[in-house]
Amino acid sequence: MPEPMRKEPGAASLADRRWVLLALTCVGAFMAPLDGSIVAVALPRMGPALGLTYGASMWVQASYLLTMAVLLIPLGRLADRRGRMHFYLAGILIFTLGSLAAALSVDGTTLILSRILQGAGGSLLTATSAAIVTAVFPPGERGRALGLNVMCVYAGLSVGPPLGGFLVDHFGWPWIFLVNLPIGLLVFGWGWLLLPGREAPAEGGRGDLPGTLLLGGSLLCLLLPLTFGSQWGWTAWSTWGLLACAACLAALFLRAETKAEAPLLDLKLLRKNRLFAMANLAALLNYMALYGIAILTAVHLQLVQGRSARAAGWIMLCQPLMQACLSPLAGRLSDRMGSRSLSTAGMLLTALGMGLLAALDRQAGAPQVVLALAVVGIGMAAFSAPNTSAVMGSVDRGQLSVASAFLGTMRVMGQALSIAFLGGIASMRLSPEEWQQLLHRHGSLHASGAFAWGYSAAMLTGALLALLGAWASLTRGARRAG
């Protein structure tokens, strides 16, 4: 059972300022999804400008996600020991510097390296944001607070598409990264002035370097072939070799963690905490289903239907807007009625929305696309905050950043797998030459038809994954106290 709320060094003053802390973490939580949603809209313009192939375009997103996947759990464990607020502010600074570097990129390589730097900052933000909120709010207010935090995540997603379309159409793609600079500097300065010297380390102890290296190597070896297997070939030796390495490193990691004095990850969370394990599985399936929607729908609207980046951004606004508006309500409901039924219903609605997207034809009007995306948004709102509250409420206070980081790792792995599976399905009938033609808006009817078919197949696959997520939510057990 998780520990009850107790006073730690500096905890009283932090709890007294919990609403200010929530505001601080909410502004930071706005940044990463803003960047992700803007990039999704801008990829069709960035491709010709930087000479990106389809694979390189996917690397722009995948490099960010791979970096986060490798760093989240180690940094979450370190934040639990050394102080979450300091790590949060470091994440803001690194993310802002990465955004500046991305804006100054001159080719695909420099852009991808900048995205890696952004991923390092994003991992610090993800590992600490929900942990900070959970640590300072009592259980009866946790769902409401996390709902507001999730609302700001979706607000970033909401602002991203129309803002990205406007910036790309009027100023050029570098401005999608430059927009992060004033936000990052404001949050860093605010946090530095608000909380200097107020937070004591949660615990001391040695780190787990072997576990960190084994886990990072395993995740890299897993995600690389899944992301690029469609280009390398699913039967290529490099694909299967890396997958075999991932399995071996994962086995070595599990063995090392059972013997470590201060393990990177307490395996009891997975073996004996059914709520924690199944809620994280639901999150993994959720993001496997959903992350491909933003990228693939932006491409479909612009390159198949011929809409401008700005028009595509406005159409895509409906999904994150529904999520932003309804997430606080879902969080408050989870405080009163528990999270399992809400999370399950949310995944079922998500499956319905993706089924509607799969049924769209090439000439589908904007109202049809908006309706399907709105249903997905309602489902996401019902799932995300209650599921996050369930995960964070199922662990001891000394494991909050690790729990937040593990949930973030499931999200990042789900996003990377979504790019691999849904992106691969969407492009399976396109040759490299036809993809380049689509990027330059001179694609043949065959090329646009091939992508339209792939888009429908990818959305149907996502709907099936969402149904599996509903099963995981339904069978994870009742809400635990605390």
Image: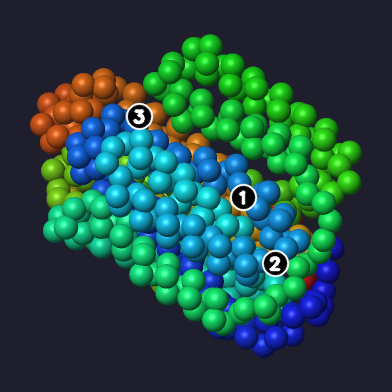
Where does the C terminus fall, quadrant-wise?
bottom right
Q: Which image quadrant for residue 143?
A: bottom right
Which label belongs to residue 83?
2
Query: At which x and y percent is residue 202?
Result: 77, 67
Q: Are marks 3 and 1 in contact (CB under 8 Å)?
A: no
Q: Which of label 2 and label 1 is nearer to you?
A: 2
- For label 1, the SS is helix
Q: At 52% from the left edge and 16% from the top edge, which residue is drawn?
A: 238
- Give the mark nearer the N terminus: 3 vs 1: 3
Residue pointed to by mark 1: 72
Identify which amino acid the numbered label 1 is placed on: Leu
The image position of residue 327, as x and y in percent, is 49, 69
Quick one: label 3, few (<14), some, or many (20+) residues within 10 Å? Answer: some
Instruction: Please identify the quadrant where the N terminus is shown.
Output: bottom right
Q: CA distance from mark 2 to mark 1?
A: 15 Å
Name which of mark 2 and mark 3 comes first in the sequence. 3
The numbered mark at residue 55 is: 3
Tell me where residue 480 appears, x and y as whole percent.
76, 65
